[in-house]
Image (tube, rainbow, N blue to C red):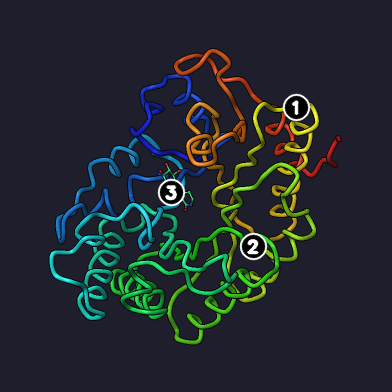
Amino acid sequence: MVWYRFGRTGEAQDPYYIAEFDNIHDFGEATPANIMKYEFTEPEAGVFNYTGAEEFLTAAAGKAIRCHNLIWSSELPTFITNPTVNWTNATLTAALRRHVTTLVEHFGDRCYSWDVVNEAFSDNPAGAYAPNIWYDTIGPAYVVEAFQAASDAVRANNLAVKLYYNDYNIEFLGNKSYAAQALVKDLKNRNIQIDGVGLESHFIAGETPSKAAQQANMEAFTALGVDVVVTELDVRLNLPPTVATEAQQVVDYYNTVAACVAVPRCVGIVVWDFDDTYSWIPGTFPGQGYGDLFLQPNGPNTPLVRKAPYDGCLEALTGAPEAL
Ligand code: XIL
């Protein structure tokens, strides 16, 4: 379990970070948090750049790779967001299909899985399609088109890569989770490949769904015949941490890992970085942080120290009852 955004914020040059990244006992799989996204892999129309992604794959050799992601609303190149000629349904669908097909074929079975579509559903109202360039131009069919293109590429090239839908606020039963479940059913009815659902799990200490709530939600997905993965786990808290919020964070990590352990088709847990030094949280949620399993008390390029949630995860993985 690991999150990794190779080369963007210096962690790839931090020997202490890399030593933990390389610790196969802790992290048997890896996800590039940014470098496989659209703006990096297809910066100009039809011009593909795999340099960063290949560096990441080299650094992560020996791990299962969750490739992330093919179609999303963010981190898009300007040729998509600011086209010289306005997109039509037909032209944007063709661009989408080219991107998906080219990446699935290029990386092939070096990807254990691909997040084919990321965050298609809204929170407001929960479960509606989120407005974005894809939805606004193509309608909900963009999701089907992306999975169809990926599915076609997998079949044509006889690949083993698993195809996932990935989102947040689908870690508990509710309208957004139901929308993702309906998508799984729809794709299966169309004979389009979908193997799993990624539950991002960007949680807040004290607001994390209980183990029972997460488990029930996971089971709702796996009952449809797909795997689930906890894909982007972190548990942030308001800064500065207190004894109480740190203790709560351990419980929240434990509950999430324990839910996955309890569900046979929950096949992985990935943390969205393992080291507070490089976490996306403080930059995205001002005033919050301290969300990862390790920290560097003396800053970048100094030894990592395990935090209490690391032990909470370990207890859940080994079936030990939560100590707190
Ligand atoms: C985030 C990265 O962590 C940031 O570095 C980047 O600036 C924005 O994207 N959901 C996802 C991830 O699926 O791709 C996002 O990653 C976090 C939310």
Residue 145 shown left or right of residue 171 in the figure:
left
Circle 2 packing at 10 Å, graded few (<14), some (14-19), many (20+), is some
User: Which residue does the numbered mark 1 point to in the structure image?
Assistant: 242
Quadrant in which residue 143 is drawn: bottom left
Residue 81 shown left or right of residue 44 in the figure:
right
Give the number of the mark in front: 2 or 1: 1
**CB within 8 Å, label 1 to label 3:** no
Q: In the structure shown, which secondary structural element does the residue marked by tag 3 occupy?
A: strand
Whichever of labels 3 and 2 marks the residue nearer the N terminus, that label is: 3
Is the C-beta of the residue carrying label 2 under 8 Å from the nearest atom of ligand 1? no
Give the residue type at disc 3: Ile
Distance of label 1 from label 3 (alpha carbons): 35 Å
Pinpoint residue 177: horizontal percent, then vertical percent: 62, 69
Distance of label 3 from label 2 (alpha carbons): 18 Å
Circle 1 packing at 10 Å, graded few (<14), some (14-19), many (20+), is few
Height in image: 56 above or below 147?
above
Query: On residue 65, which mark appears?
Result: 3
Q: Nearer the viewer, residue 40 or 174?
A: 174
Whichever of labels 1 and 3 marks the residue nearer the N terminus, that label is: 3
Q: Is residue 317 visible?
A: no
User: Which residue does the numbered mark 2 point to in the structure image?
Assistant: 265
Which residue is drawn at the image coordinates 34% and 39% (left, top)? 56
